[in-house]
Amino acid sequence: MQELVNQINSYVWSEHLVYLCLGAGLLFSILTRFVQIRHFRQMIRLVASGKESDHGISSFQALAVSLSGRVGTGNIAGVAAAIGFGGPGAVFWMWVVAFFGAATAYVESTLGQIYKEELDGQYRGGPAFYIEKAMGYQWYAWFFALATILATGLLLPTVQANAISSSIEIAFGSNGSIESFLGTISYTKLFSTTFVVTVFGIIIFGGVKRIARVTQVIVPFMALTYIVIALSIIVLNIELLPRVIGLIMADAFTPMAGVGAAIGWGVKRGVYSNEAGQGTGCHAASAAEVNHPAEQGLVQAFSVYVDTLLVCSATAFMILITGAYNVHGSDGGFILQNLPAATDASSPAFTQIAVQSAMPTIGKPFIALALFFFAFTTVLAYYYIAETNVAYLRRFFRIPADMFILKLMMICAVFYGGVRTAELAWGLGDMGVGLMAWLNIIAILILLLKGNAALKALHDYEAQLDAGVSKYSFDPEALGISNADFWARRKNMSHSD
């Protein structure tokens, strides 16, 4: 199984996808005149604005749901893997892909808002919707929806569940093991995974509103706590900070693991973490109740900053400042070895050892707790994304009890991932991320040739911003945007009132 997954990923995550992610981000940054810099103040303002409605969630709730998908295992174990296989310079390339990716996140999330629909009393949107409506390729939309259900419903949850159980096992030991048809499973992994599955089932059967309310409390609190711990470790070792920054910058261009490894692992783990270009974040963005599509696009661009420039950087600095890492070579040996050879670079071990070395009494348990909340809320976000794509497909295909089947499928995926090895779980997750990124980035690049509604929406928003309007509005027909049925109906209703 591991060999098959590695072979598939060698094609999915070829250098072509790495440069496609970077190139698309650079292109959208230029076309939007670096919206991620120009409208940073607007991003901050919009995060706190907006209210939920009977059909949609607030901007902050949408940010929390999308952040719950972004802030997860990739921020803790993913950063460790980037350093472990790409060297310290991989952190620089994570920053680069986040900076350019913020523009990509704006484009895809604004498109999600423009072409969203109201299905079963809830706002729904995402790449499948704008591929069908803006591109006119229904078969492509169906393919993306199926790929996303596969990725977020089966493949990606295994990574998050495995990180939770692995971090708990590292913190508290295996406490014995049991033989099963899935192999040898430690009691710690078995009990922790069973607990996660139980709580997960209770929440997802409560619907998107319950998911939004859970994530809007957990995600900001845990992200802030995690960053405070990281800052404490940095302050305790402040004299080492200039050396660490210098190490990241120097290794970015003359990397010990090779240029390809540094860029490849930095971009791969950066995209896995901040999700810009995958098309996942725009599902939550589409559910927000806003007055103009560009507003939620800006909020989602801000979420990329929070994910990578804050949380991922916090992890990277903790690992590098404490020296709690190894760098693996392509030949299977070590380029740099600071830790025992058995330390798994694909697990949260680097991060837990880093915190443990600076704060011996709380290190490993704290990272286990942080990973539990980060990874658990990410799985909730994955469920919402998969559910949205099932809702999209059910307009064309009726499968009895489809939502129940999805819930059951995800519960099984979470359990499987929780008791399996980290390497296999990450391989499955990378496959899911890569597949969605290929399909979505190609789609939004094609939309450039079809008028690019996201850019038109940005220009319209900026015109109203300059005019100082008290309440923003969006008229797609006046902008030459067709098939934006939700917003066209909303505009007509406001005129009739």
Image (cartoon, rainbow, N blue to C red):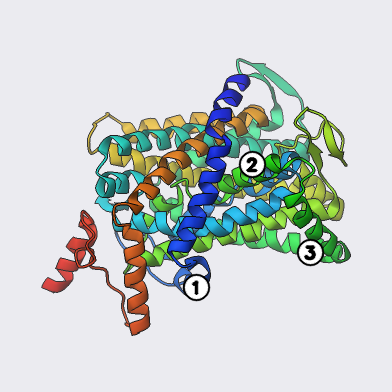
Q: Tell me which label, 1 or 3, sits earlier in the chain.
A: 1
Q: Secondary structure at mark 2?
A: helix
Q: Quadrant of residue 313?
A: bottom right
* Circles 2, 1 touching at the beta carbon (< 8 Å): no
Q: Give the quadrant of residue 55.
A: bottom left
Q: Give the residue at x 85% y 32%.
A: 341
Task: Please give the label number shown on residue 232.
Answer: 3
- Reading the image, the residue beneath label 1 is 38
Inspect the image, locate mark 2, and give the three-letter code of the amino acid beneath it.
Gly
Residue type for callout 1: Arg
On-image quarter of the C terminus? bottom left
Q: Residue at x 86, y 51 (%)?
A: 357
Residue that carries the numbered disc 2 in the rendered image: 264
Identify whether 382 is placed above or below 276: above
Q: Amino acid at mark 3?
A: Ser
Number of numbered labels in the structure image:
3
C-beta proximity under 8 Å, tags 1 and 3: no
Secondary structure category for the residue under label 3: helix
Q: Using the image as rendered, state which of residue 240 and residue 56 is in the foreground.
A: 240
- Residue at figure coordinates x 76%, y 46% from the top left: 255
Q: Nearer the viewer, mark 3 or mark 2?
A: 2
Q: Can you tell which mark lies on residue 256?
A: none
Tell whether label 2 touches label 3 (CB within 8 Å). no
In the image, is 90 to the left or to the right of 289? right
